[in-house]
Amino acid sequence: MEVPVLNDGADDIKSLMVGKKKVKKHYIDNKKFEKLIQQYILDKTDKEVEDELVKYLDLLISNILLTFRFSVDHEDAKQECFLLVFKILKNFNKEAGSAFNYFTTVIVNNCKLLYTKNKKYYLKMEEYKETITGNRKPSGNPPLAE
């Protein structure tokens, strides 16, 4: 069995051995992402900046939906996330943290909310269907006196 040779990764192993923190690379260039956000806030009419920002946000939202495997309709969730992100874009503060972390948190929390709403809706619908078909009485509601 042949042991693979580490060329570029030697520094990574050394840093792990001495306990240094390894910086994780994101799939989005955070500096460019933050620059696009600032440009978009200053000039919402610049179509090129808007298109590039939409590409970044689409990648971020899609990866979050795939990674966390939320039980929601992905297209509906994606649209909801886009609406929310563009609504709160002006609230982003570069000094408070990175754009990647900020928008990831916003998107994940929004997807959790969508999942909870959908789950409650489907449970109510199932209860209603069971009540209509006579398979089950409504839970928690006393019978109406006639």
Image: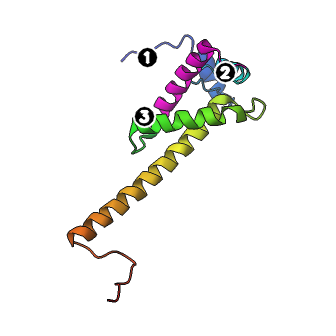
Percent x, y for residue 107? 55, 38
- Looking at the image, which is closer to me, 66 or 129? 129
Left of 139 or right of it: where is 93? right
Q: Which residues are magenta?
A: 43-66
Residue at image coords 55%, 22%:
54
Q: Which mark is residue 66?
A: 3
Q: Secondary structure at mark 2?
A: loop
Label for residue 3?
1
Whether residue 27 is visible, yes or no, is no
Residue assigned mark 2: 44
Question: Nearer the viewer's eye, disc 2 or disc 1?
Answer: 2
Mark pair 1, 3: CA separation: 34 Å
Residue 8 in percent (x, y) is at 57, 12
Determine which quarter of the picture holds residue 123.
Answer: bottom left
Left or right, residue 62 beside residue 104? left
Tell me the amino acid under the disc marked 2. Lys
Are the residues at dot 3 and dot 2 in contact (C-beta closer than 8 Å)?
A: no
Residue 31 lies in quadrant: top right
In this rendering, the answer to whether 27 lies above or below 104 is above
Question: For the residues carrying marks 3 and 2, which lies nearer the camera in this image?
Answer: 2
Q: Give the main secondary structure of the magenta stretch.
A: helix
Task: Identify the residue at image location x=50%, y=31%.
Answer: 61
Where in the figure is residue 28, as x and y percent of width and height?
58, 22
The answer to whether residue 54 is magenta is yes
Q: CA distance from mark 3 to mark 2?
A: 29 Å
Q: Which labelled disc corresponds to residue 25?
A: none
Along the polypeptide, which appears first: circle 2 or circle 1? 1
| Residue reaching furthest to the bottom | 146
Give the position of the N terminus as an image quadrant.
top left
Above-or-below relation of 79 to 37: below
